[in-house]
Amino acid sequence: AGGGTAGLERTAPVGTDPDDIPPVDRFVFASESCLPVATLNEMEMALFGPRSVDSQNESEKAKQPQTTKDDDKTIASLYDKSWINARSNPNNGYAKQLQWDAIRPSDIPQNIIWKADQWMALTRTHGMAIVSIPSKHLEDRPLWPAFRKVRASDEMYFSTALSTLGILHRPKGGGEVTGESSTKNESCAGNRVRRRRITYCDWSVGAKNPASFTRREWKEVVEKARGEGCLLARKFVERSSSSAGSMRGGKRKIGAAN
């Protein structure tokens, strides 16, 4: 994943036909500094739920309780959601000035601007809906130029695009969607979205960049990430054997992607 509008231009090309989207069911955003903290089977279960009766082999059928095809459809609908750790208002002055206020109200009204972790998982339905915005709603004009002046625009583009489509929205009772996601409030942004992060990051060292980890901290990071239900963790960096001490202090300059 690439940050800024250059990354957006690559990710959201003009005139893309939804039929040209690769035949996949989930789009998981990650970078070279992300590492998985779950097995492939655990990822499959988290993103898709239990396998349907038709897709199970004989040994799997023997281990699992018997279900009908109607049961499978009901279960699948519970998991057919994007993972987006999104919020509907600025979380600090930086976000207000350099993200929300950097988008012209004539391009996008402030009340439908959302922010999210750029590390997310989109269902195919949501990915196709975003790609279709220019052709269906903007007379073939791209949406991404509205984010040209936005700092860390990849944190804004996808969540705001989903908001313009009505997929992300505030609770029916009103109020903002704020704070960190959790199992308790993960659906408060709409029943087609799990409002939780897919990638674990440690922002305790500062608001600009997450902490960087090395192999020595792998076990600790994995335990924390899995404890939060994350499937990936970042950001991991290589370090020469002569470098000592933890990267969490934030004093060393790291060349890895943010």
Image: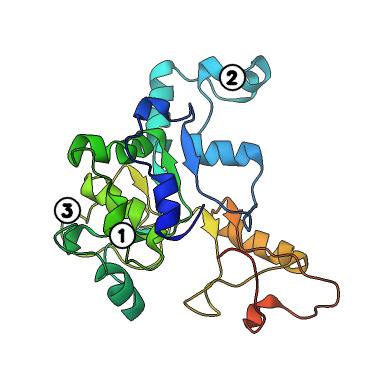
As drawn, 46 above or below 152: above
Local secondary structure at mark 1: helix
Q: Amino acid at mark 1?
A: Phe
Q: How many marks?
A: 3
**Numbered disc in front, either 1 or 2:** 1
Location of residue 21 (image quadrant) = top left
As drawn, 56 above or below 249: above
Q: CA distance from mark 3 to mark 2?
A: 39 Å
At 41% across and 37% down in the image, what residue appears? 123
Q: Amino acid at mark 3?
A: Lys
Label 1: which residue?
A: 147
Label 3: which residue?
A: 172
At 59% across and 59% down in the image, what residue appears? 225
At 54% across and 26% down in the image, what residue appears? 51
Decide: few, some or many residues near mark 1? Use Cα within 10 Å; few <14, some 14-19, many ≥20.
many
- Going from N to C along the chain, the mark reached first, 3 or 2, is 2
Location of residue 148 (image quadrant) = bottom left
Q: Amino acid at mark 2?
A: Gln
As drawn, 66 above or below 42: above
